Image (cartoon, rainbow, N blue to C red):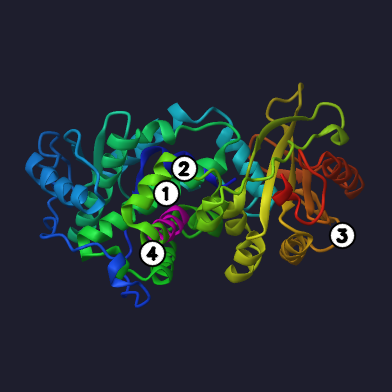
Amino acid sequence: MIGAVLAATAALVGCTPASAPAAPASAQTPDAARPAAPATRPPAGGAGPIGGGEIDPEEARLTKEEVARVLALVAKARGLPVLRDVRSRVLARGEILQRIRAHVEREIPEGVLDHQREVLAALELIPADYDFTAGMYRLLEGRIAGFYEPDDQTMYLVDDLSESEAEETLAHELVHALQDQSFSLGKLLDYKAGDSDRLAATHALVEGEAMSAMFDVLVGSAFQIDESMLRKLVAMSTAMSSVGDTPLVLQESLGAPYTDGFAFVQALRREGGWASVDAVWRALPETTEQLLHPEKLAAREPAVEVAVPTAAALGPGFRVVFDDVMGEQALRISFAAYAHRDAAIGAAAGWGGDRYAVARRDDPQDPTRREFALAWRLRFDSAADAAEAGKVIERRFGKACKQRAGLGPVAWTARGSDMAIVAGPYERRGGGEVSAVGTCAGAKAWLAEVMKGGARGGASGEGAKGRQ
């Protein structure tokens, strides 16, 4: 779910948030797994006119010599060839955001972000009246340091970076340029309807590799970076730079590709160096479960294919207008809004497969009035895993159907390794205000319909995923 939100922005343009400070060295990493430190460091700063003020287009670019020098360092650290020069520009923060907006508008079909808003609102992950799209861009504007655009093969840096931020961003974005030259980055990050979990996994690999190679260049070895400390620093930095009303789920979604991806790439490098990472590029992870658990990637453990929930029980006029897969990473991020992070990680770790659907009914007499509802069907690896996830859901929504004043009813149930959640219907008018239109009786009938739909290709119960 969240993958289609910020992966639809950050992933599509290789977006880089301002980097957190380097963390303490990890004592657990064997020296043999650490690459040799580069002979030289990239130049400090050197990102064009750093600071405010109007920018002369002829001056607002990095020198070719500077980019080439750092590109050579990055290529040597990562072990990828330089196939062509990398164009670069330094732009004002507002101009950078305009380019990101333009890219998203080109790549993401109309309505996707609006429907994502309804998913997050129905699950109480953002306030019902929160302007999701505007909030997402505000968050990006505050955190963006630069991005690489595959479409024009150009690296863009923000003009107000400090010397250290410019140094980090230059190295990071040049890794993306090398990825694009060797692996056709743009094609891999193209938006595909219903494919957000795969996109999120690829995005995390892209960003995790850039973080790992960047640290090799900046501090001599990425294995000097403590992964848990980096995670805390990224979260703290994002929270401090966020607008006051930015929901936690958006903050976590922005940082997760970098921290989860870094942990994934480091695990691969411990096993077999950059050659192991190269092998993953030839056979990408299909789910964020495989990314979060490298042993499941090695086993190529598939997700359970779950049918798109239907909406017949909601009555005439309702139709499914959007569906997607959340995946383990987004499930963990969502659960963290309901419970402590450790509990969220444990509850999400049993994910086997899922599919959610947004249903909508339009008012033919009033185009400013629409009704929305959400159904979400999940399959866990075992009944025990489903029960653990159920504790997190119960903590937020209770055991029985809960009637909410604005968002309507929310109800859930679990049977064996299967779980389903329904929320709504609720009415949203042109101004954004919401009001409940559904009842718990209707929610229970819909819940039964969603549970009956089930997962494709297997019966409920322990070990269903392993049999498929």
Identify the residue under disc 2: 284
Identify the residue under disc 1: 205
The reply to whether callout 3 and callout 4 are in contact (CB within 8 Å) is no
Q: Would you identify the image quadrant in which residue 194 lies?
A: top right
Identify the residue under disc 3: 400
Report the predominant secondary structure element of the magenta stretch: helix
Is 265 inside the magenta-drawn segment?
yes
Residue most extreme to the top? 364
Q: Of label 3 and label 1, which has the lower sequence position?
A: 1
Q: Secondary structure at mark 1?
A: helix
Q: Of label 4 and label 2, which has the lower sequence position?
A: 4
The magenta segment is 256-266
| Measured Cα–Cα span from mark 2 to mark 1 | 9 Å
The reply to whether callout 2 and callout 1 are in contact (CB within 8 Å) is yes
| Measured Cα–Cα span from mark 4 to mark 2 | 30 Å
Q: Secondary structure at mark 3?
A: loop
Instruction: Give the residue type that dot 4 points to.
Output: Ser
The residue lying at 14 percent from left, 39 percent from top is 61
Q: Quadrant of the N terminus?
A: top right
Residue 69, position as x, y percentages in the image: 10, 47
Instruction: Give the residue type that dot 2 points to.
Output: Leu
For disc 2, the neighbor class at 10 Å (few under 14, some 14 to 19, many from 20) is: some
Identify the residue under disc 4: 237
Q: Of label 3 and label 4, which has the lower sequence position?
A: 4
